[in-house]
Amino acid sequence: MGGDPRRGRLVELLGPVVAEKGLDLEDVKIVPAGRRRLVRVIVDRDGGVTLDDVAEVSQSVSKRLDESDALGAGPYVLEVSSPGVDRPLTEPRHWRRARGRLVKAELRDGATVEGRVTGTGESGVELDGTRRIAFDELIRGRVQVEFNRPADLDDGYDIDDTDDEG
């Protein structure tokens, strides 16, 4: 997660601003860019993020950064976006949002499994409607790019039992 010591402070500062807009703060990265710094704020939510969401949260985040001294006096460029398809699935909400997608997962026992996320719940994820894997068995997963993805797949966010976040 980035070596800049200001990262933790930015997460604390911006988390409530992003949550106020109904989004999850997934990551904050500070990248040197010449004399400036690029501040990347990654946001997401169930159902995805629209361009209007990004614009609205970008204004709120920019205002909050300008009101604080979290970045010091130097100039910065703010970039707010949603996570890409290559984002690792590490949290229960990431798995829930991957419902209907083909994923490859690394397990704590060293095994790797691949399958379609057909459900998530309080304790784990279901692949292909048959294999249940507890979250504590998972290290991380990645959505696999599918060029010929079946059109009839359900991309809904319904779950087969209660999720971790209510």
Image (cartoon, rainbow, N blue to C red):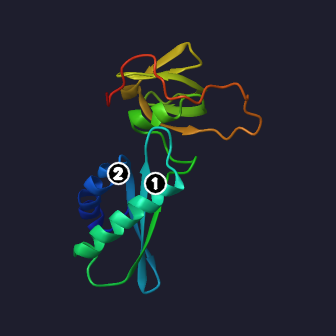
Residue linked to disc 1: 53
- Image location of residue 28, percent across then percent down: 37, 60
Q: Residue at x 39, y 55 (%)?
A: 27
**Amino acid on which disc 2 is placed:** Lys
Residue plotted at (57% across, 48% down): 86
- Residue 37 appears left or right of 144: left
Q: Residue beneath label 2, please?
A: 21
Give the crowd class for mark 2: few <14, some 14-19, many >=20 residues within 10 Å. Answer: few
- The picture quadrant where one finds residue 77 is bottom left
- Residue 61 pos. (x, y %): 34, 64
How packed mark 1 is, by other alpha carbons closer than 10 Å (few <14, some 14-19, many 20 or more), is: some
Q: Secondary structure at mark 2?
A: loop
The quarter of the rendered structure image containing the C terminus is: top left
Q: What residue do we see at 45% from left, 54% from top?
A: 53
> As displayed, is residue 35 above or below residue 3?
below
Q: Is residue 53 rendered to the left or right of residue 128?
A: left
The one nearer the camera, 97 or 105, is: 97
Answer yes or no: is residue 128 visible.
yes
Q: Is residue 5 visible?
A: no
SS under mark 1: helix
Say how many tags the image has: 2
Q: Which amino acid, mark 1?
A: Asp
Which is nearer the N-term, disc 1 or disc 2? Answer: 2
Residue sitting at the far right: 148
Q: Are marks 1 and 2 in contact (CB under 8 Å)?
A: yes
Instruction: Return the x and y of residue 136 as percentages of the image width and height.
Output: 36, 27
For the N terminus, give its image quadrant: bottom left
